[in-house]
Amino acid sequence: MFRSRTAPLAKQFAGAQRQVLSRRGYASPDAGGGGNMPLVLGLAGLAGLGGYVYLQRNPSTQAAISANKNEALGRAEDAADSLKGKAQAGAAALSANANEAIGRSKDKAQEVKDDVKGPFDEERKAMGNPGAAPVEALIKNSWVDFKLEKVEPYNHNTKIYTFSFPDSESIAGGKAASALLTKASDPQALLDDKGKPVIRPYTPISHSDEKGNLRLLVKEYPTGKMSKHIANLKPGETLAFKGPIQKYEYKPNEFAHGVTIGGGSGITPMYQMISHSLSLPEDKTKWTLIFANVTEKDILLREEWDRLAKQHPDRFKAVYTLDNPPFMLWKGEKGFVTKEMISKYLPSDHNEKANTKFFVCGPPGQYAAVCGPKDGMKQGEIKGALGELGYTNDNVFKF
């Protein structure tokens, strides 16, 4: 059917083409650039016309082509939807992973805040975090005023002074063995012979983690400017503090036996270090205290020393020696601290004796007799009784 209808049209087109060529006088493109393009275009148009007529005469073929077209479009849409779904799922997964990573970072940051003691303490306290480290009231490089809350007489020339912190939840801070510096809240109220503010170190007898206050045991000396100034303070007045300053870094089990030799108010560093050591269950260090005073009533913190000796009989022994002991019922030592007295209380075990550390704190005369004076801020050569016993700077520390 298709051939019968298209053949006459083709013959007519061919006849027309021959007439045109006969008039031009040639059947191929001329040298000027002509060609057979009109013939090609005519044939293409004829083919298209034939295809149109064929599809009009054959609806089933047209429907099949349309169905194939729709099926292809459907597959393309399904593929596009699949790609869109995968892209959305990937984006969701990335978002979830990002949120999870952010959450882990926040948790880690909070853990660091919980573990670090310092800049985050105020923040954690404000948030009510029970794991927050207490705020330290003392500032190492700045003076702060603490108010005198109460004064308790200890003996004829010594008192215990309790100073409160502005924040009742804060602590003094510091490690054993640490001291703090004091000066008058009004620097011009207490000057030395050169016109400079008087500054003196003291070692608190309160624990470094005690909340709300610190306590000083201060012995008043006739020529002591700071001790007199503190003795004249009234409750409600203030004293300036700075610190803490670590004098010696104590480490549990660093040595087998510690021997502390003190005199007068020089006993406070010994009390801080020994009481700290005895409070540590893992610390096995043994301690001997040789405490020299003039009379029995001069023995500072005697109740505390006796209590520690009773609680830790296998780790601590207190030895008191007096210049003027009672006439009767005195069971302690008499006179100054000598090498014979020191040797008497040294460990009998050779290995423990070799692993012994001495700590000395007292008046200048005691330093000279026991270990030799300090050389300014330096420890100085070991002389006196400990030098005669063969001990060196490796075995001796002077507060």
Image (cartoon, helix red, strand yellow):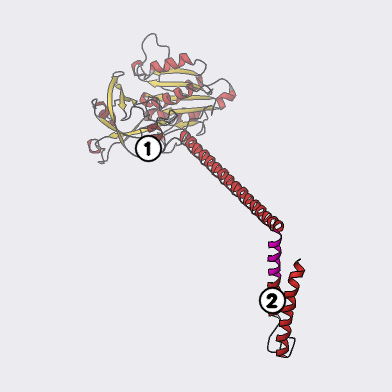
Q: Residue at x 50, y 29 (%)?
A: 388
**Left or right of residue 221, residue 245 in this image:** right
Q: Is residue 329 above or below residue 110?
A: above
Is residue 106 highlighted in magenta? Answer: no
| Image quadrant containing the N terminus | bottom right
Q: Is residue 135 visible?
A: no
What is the residue that sits farthest to the top in this orientation? 329
Observer-side mark, 1 or 2, equals 2
| Most common SS among magenta residues | helix
Q: Which residues are magenta?
A: 47-58
Secondary element at image label 1: loop
Secondary element at image label 2: helix
Is residue 52 highlighted in magenta? Answer: yes
Q: Position of residue 289 (x, y in %)?
A: 45, 21
**Left or right of residue 225, residue 248 in this image:** right
Amino acid type for the residue under numbered disc 2: Gly
Amino acid type for the residue under numbered disc 1: Lys
Q: Residue at x 68, y 72 (%)?
A: 45
Determine which quarter of the picture holds residue 255.
Answer: top right
Q: Along the line of sight, which residue is nearer the eye, 96 or 277?
A: 96
What residue is disc 1 on? 140
Q: Along the line of sight, which residue is nearer the eye, 249 or 324?
A: 249
Determine which quarter of the picture holds residue 360.
Answer: top left
What residue is disc 2 on? 42
Q: Position of residue 28 (x, y in %)?
A: 74, 86
Q: Is residue 53 visible?
A: yes
Q: Is residue 185 above or below residue 338?
A: below
